[in-house]
Amino acid sequence: MELSLTLDKQRQAIFDGLTDAAKELFFKILQKARTLGQLDIATRYEIGEMLVEAVSAPHTYGAGVVDQYAKILGNENAKWILYQCKKVAERFTREELDAIATRQFPDGSFVTWTHVRMLAEIEDKRRRKSILEQMLKKGLSTQELRKLVSPPSKDERQAPLKIGAPRNAFSALDQIRAFGEALIAQAEAWDSVLWSGLENAADVTLNEDVLEKLRTAVLQLEEMATIVGEQLSKARATAEKVQTILSKRAALKGRTAEAVPAEAASAPASNGKSGDSRAGVPVQARPQAAWHTAKQNLERIKRARAGIS
């Protein structure tokens, strides 16, 4: 049987180093993994059973066989998926799993693989059964089930990262600019890593958990688009109002500038009330004129005193 994966030299060397039994088991797992685009619970359980067998017999399959399989598949997510399949097979018997897979939620939907693998994280069998019954009775989503299986840590309970309330309208505009720059940079990173990475991922690494996260991402991005759209409409309307105010201000300033020279030309030059002159004396000459007047008054006072004496 030939390996239907394109391997580089390093991954090929890992595959060549497997025992014959490990190679044969790898082909079986790969064949089952490619049976369905989205693997069902039963198929994943069968893969888990194979891995449990391989790990329990290192003399036949070699040590660290699951890690070796993940390296050959060449995807970081592959290791996680393989160990999840193995854990489910260790936690449940085939009869227990079949009973879970055929149970329905109140809305008529069936248990998913994500539900099963989350339940498998519970070591205590009695607690696992209790949470399973709660899940089926209440029709818990995987996110709701996660809260029962693994209560959030103190750090996880912290409020999500926020920019914070702006001090005023002007600081809010600065926040929008900073947030926009960060979002644009993040979107570029998503384009280069996220979307292309999922498009090129091997079928074995795609599962219901990935699909669920994608659906959540779609809903969140749609909500973000709605919020951004509403903020954009408000920003445009406000920008138009500010533009109108500035236009009126500029027009008013122009009319005022035209009116000032006409008023100055019609005012008497010697009325002493002109904004630019006083009794015909330019503004720049006012200090000198005042000094000259004061000197004249002082001389008059001296002559008057001399006459009296």
Image (tube, rainbow, N blue to C red):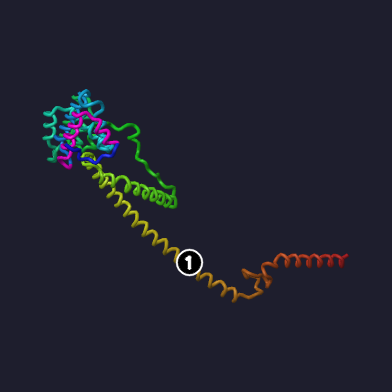
Residue closer to the observer: 65 or 6: 6
Name the outermost residue toward the right. Answer: 309
In percent of the image, x 43 and y 63: which residue is there?
245
Q: Is residue 250 left or right of residue 129?
A: right
Quadrant for the N terminus, please. Answer: top left
Residue 259, given in percent of the width and then of the height, sits at: 54, 72
In percent of the image, x 52 and y 69: which residue is there?
256
Residue 274 placement: quadrant? bottom right
Residue 146, given in percent of the width and then of the height, sits at: 24, 34
In percent of the image, x 20 and y 40: which residue is there?
4
Residue closer to the observer: 235 or 266: 235
Please tell me whether the stretch drawn in magenta is mainly helix, strand or loop.
helix
How many numbered marks does the figure carry?
Answer: 1
Residue closer to the observer: 144 or 63: 63
Q: Residues within 10 Å of mark 1 (few under 14, many from 20)?
A: few
Query: Which residue is disc 1 drawn over?
Result: 250
Q: Is residue 137 visible?
A: no
The magenta span reads 10-37
Residue closer to the observer: 40 or 234: 40
What's the residue type where badge 1 is placed? Ala
Residue 309, given in percent of the width and then of the height, sits at: 88, 65
Q: Is residue 34 left or right of residue 172?
A: left
Residue 75 placement: quadrant? top left
Q: Is residue 78 left or right of residue 189?
A: left
Identify the secondary structure beneath mark 1. helix
**237 in magenta:** no
**33 in magenta:** yes
